[in-house]
Image (cartoon, helix red, strand yellow):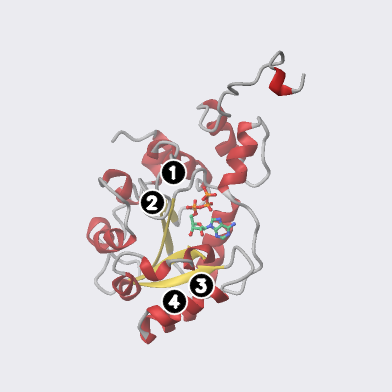
Amino acid sequence: MSFSHELHLARAEERGDWARVKRVGVFGGSFDPVHRGHWNAASLAQAAFDLERIVFVPAASPPHKPGRSLAGGPDRAHMLALAITSRPDWSISTMELERPGLSYTIDTLRELPGRLGLARDVQLFLILGNDNLRGFERWKDVHEILERASPIVVLRDAKNSSALEKIRTALAPGAVARLERGLLANAPLAIDATSLRAALARGEAPAGMDPKVAAYARAKNLYVAPPQVGRTATDPASGA
Ligand code: ATP
């Protein structure tokens, strides 16, 4: 995979100074595109758990979004790089984009320490929005995920409770306790990528994202509206 200049600078794999770092946040997602909700979640998690570094991991093919077509991995990673240029403690790993098949979090947590050269006593933290609690008990090797990384769950919509109830009955008590220790009680920031893609498709410059990211998405026509078919001004069904 070839990397843009910005992505080259932001890649975790290029840093080579990971051996002394003790507390690392891992933040996976589709980032299609990255927005201020992601930025806010990363900042809140970092402050609450004293993280030295955060690694953003854009997914090639998220298992919980089957059939969803995403902007290309290099474009999503490039937009992430544009969004985090002011943060030397934040970086991007392209490991999931390079891995074939579905992007499972457990594979990333197994591979990341060796790939970056992390110390044996590093503590990993997995940053999640609380929408990810729905069905979390079915994530591949979920108990091992919770052993390898302490979860940090950022509120993005009002309620955790029904998803947490399911998790409580499905997971071992120790795993549930780890999850509960990571729940943040932040004020949610109602920004989502789906609405931003729709706004970009309408030609708007949405406030919920970095203008550099919006400009890149526009220049590359990443989220253009699908062509209107089957309706014309003379089509009787159009009411004209
Ligand atoms: P889409 O609308 O395309 O599904 P998304 O922004 O909801 O996009 P991802 O890009 O996959 O989804 O999100 C990556 C991670 O960031 C997930 O853990 C998600 O829960 C979290 N996240 C996304 N938006 C917010 C937000 N506004 N506040 C807190 N966490 C968020």
Kindly identify which residue carries mark 4: 167
> Is residue 178 visible in the rendered structure shown here?
yes
Kindly identify which residue carries mark 2: 62
Q: Is mark 1 within 8 Å of ligand 1?
A: yes
Kindly identify which residue carries mark 1: 68
Tell me how far mark 3 sits from mark 2, CA to CA: 20 Å
Kindly identify which residue carries mark 3: 163
Q: Amino acid at mark 1?
A: Arg
Q: Amino acid at mark 2?
A: Pro
Q: Is residue 66 or residue 149 the one in the foreground?
A: 66
Tell me how far mark 4 sits from mark 3, CA to CA: 6 Å
- Residue positioned most to the right: 240
Q: Secondary structure at mark 2?
A: loop
Q: Earlier in the sequence, mark 1 or mark 4?
A: 1
Check whether the beta carbons of the residues at disc 1 and disc 2 lie within 8 A of each other: yes
Residue 150 point in image, percent of width and height? 39, 74
